[in-house]
Image (tube, rainbow, N blue to C red):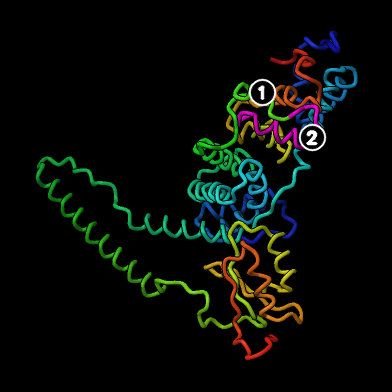
Amino acid sequence: MTHNGRFENSVEHQEISALIPWYVNDTLADTERQRVDAHVGSCAVCREDFALHKRILEGINAQPALDYMPVASLKRLQARLDVAQAQAATAPLPPIEPSRSDVPWRGWMAASIAAMAVAIGLLAADRWVQFEVRSKQPNYRTVTTSIPRPPGEVIRAVFSPSITLVELQTILDEAQLKIVSGPTEAGVYSLASNSTLTVRSSLALLRRHSTVRFAEGTLPEPESGNSP
Amino acid sequence: MTPLAKNSSPKERDSALLAAVAAGDRRALEELYLSYHRRLARFLSRFTPRYENIEEIINDTFMVVWQNAKDFRNASQVSTWVIGIAYRTALKSFRRQKNHNVAHSLEDYPEQSVDPTSDTEVHDWLKHGLSRLPMEQRLTLELAYHMGHSLEEIAVITDCPVGTVKARMFHAREKLRQYLPALGGGPGESPARIG
């Protein structure tokens, strides 16, 4: 169906029609915007396109967006960077080309000696890196080590890496807890009580959620009752 | 990293951070990561519901940023450069996923699986229609309408001529028009326009 035969096949119409998406998202330069303004005012086809694009834009932006917590993801990126940097530090050097000497065996001998020196150097560097890593880091991780407790901490918990900020806040509100520290490298949060709710009750509320991977109290439980 | 003035613009801040990344500053990379994570995660969550996939794409993107920051020549904005890397990483990732739910052409879905006469919300129709677009067309649409990028920025991000971006947007619109009668008339009403 033709809405506006006067414009539909003109070059101007085709150019303006192609710009309408960026007229709608308000990123056109002033001169282009003025051209679209002038054309849309007198072209029914472009007005219809404008309405269509505007509704698509509104529809896209009306869809709910989830917010994710970046900290755990960043820690995994840092681990990848550590590995990449360690690999780069111990990567073998490119092979040494033999020198263009008049006496060929001298070049080969020099290359062999250099290669052996590099190999010995790499071996020593590798041993040193391994020693450094072993001496600095234990080869295990715990979530209940004797690291000093942050003030007020009553519970340590680990959440699913895919938990959203909104979900986390909802769970904490429900269990009447607040974050006092974390996450650690192992993703552990230290939580303090926000109310008079007992630690046991807060733990029970936390453990109801599948996104809570781990939750334990950090204070010794009393014989009866369990006021924090 | 050189401290920035308090009134520096986001563009200046990004440029300073990337320069520091190019010099090997891991703290600068982390700061850049944290400032882009939210918008990239929101953008990518429109294509995949699994956070594991989203995180993989974002972290792959920042590995590339870390490795290639020294090659950035200010030919575009830092944000356009970063999002361009994320675009290519996402495109590769989506193509790798054998069972992703994106069709390669509308003809793969000759019959509508949703009753157009039902009371389905316009947004449901839109979501349904978007999921049937070829990935490049959908990404173009989302870059313009979800991320708010200009035509020229999308050309840089997608590494395509401006004419290709316009054509992708045109075809996306025409397919959505066919698929979303509630939005803009049925297929028979679509007049001939730019080719």
- Amino acid tagged 1: Glu
Q: Is residue A11 above or below residue B47?
A: above
**Residue at x 76% of width, y 25% of height:** A19
Q: Is residue A146 above or below residue A113?
A: below
Using a 10 Å C-alpha cutoff, classify the residue at mark 2 as few (fewer than 14 neighbours), some (14 to 19) or many (20 or more): few
Q: Is residue A138 left or right of residue B122?
A: left
Residue A26 can be seen, yes or no: no
Position of the C terminus of chain A by quadrant: bottom right
| Subunit bearing disc 2 | B
Marks 1 and 2: same chain? yes
**Is A188 in the magenta?**
no
Using a 10 Å C-alpha cutoff, classify the residue at mark 1 as few (fewer than 14 neighbours), some (14 to 19) or many (20 or more): few
**Residue at x 73% of width, y 64% of height:** A170
> To which quarter of the image does residue A166 belong?
bottom right
Position of the N terminus of chain A by quadrant: top right
> To which quarter of the image does residue B85 belong?
top right
- Which numbered disc covers residue A170? none
The residue segment tinted magenta is B115-137
- Which numbered disc covers residue B111? 1
Q: Earlier in the sequence, mark 1 or mark 2?
A: 1
**Is B130 in the magenta?**
yes
- Which numbered disc covers residue B120? 2
> Residue A32: where, in percent of width, then height?
79, 26
Extreme residue in the bottom direction:
A223
> Residue A53: where, in percent of width, then height?
79, 29
Q: Is residue B184 above or below residue A221?
A: above
Q: Is residue B34 left or right of residue B148?
A: left
The secondary element bearing badge 1 is classed as loop
**Residue at x 65% of width, y 30% of height:** B132
> Residue B185: where, in percent of width, then height?
81, 21
Query: How far is the residue under mark 1 from the one under mark 2?
Result: 17 Å
> Residue A82: where, in percent of width, then height?
44, 60
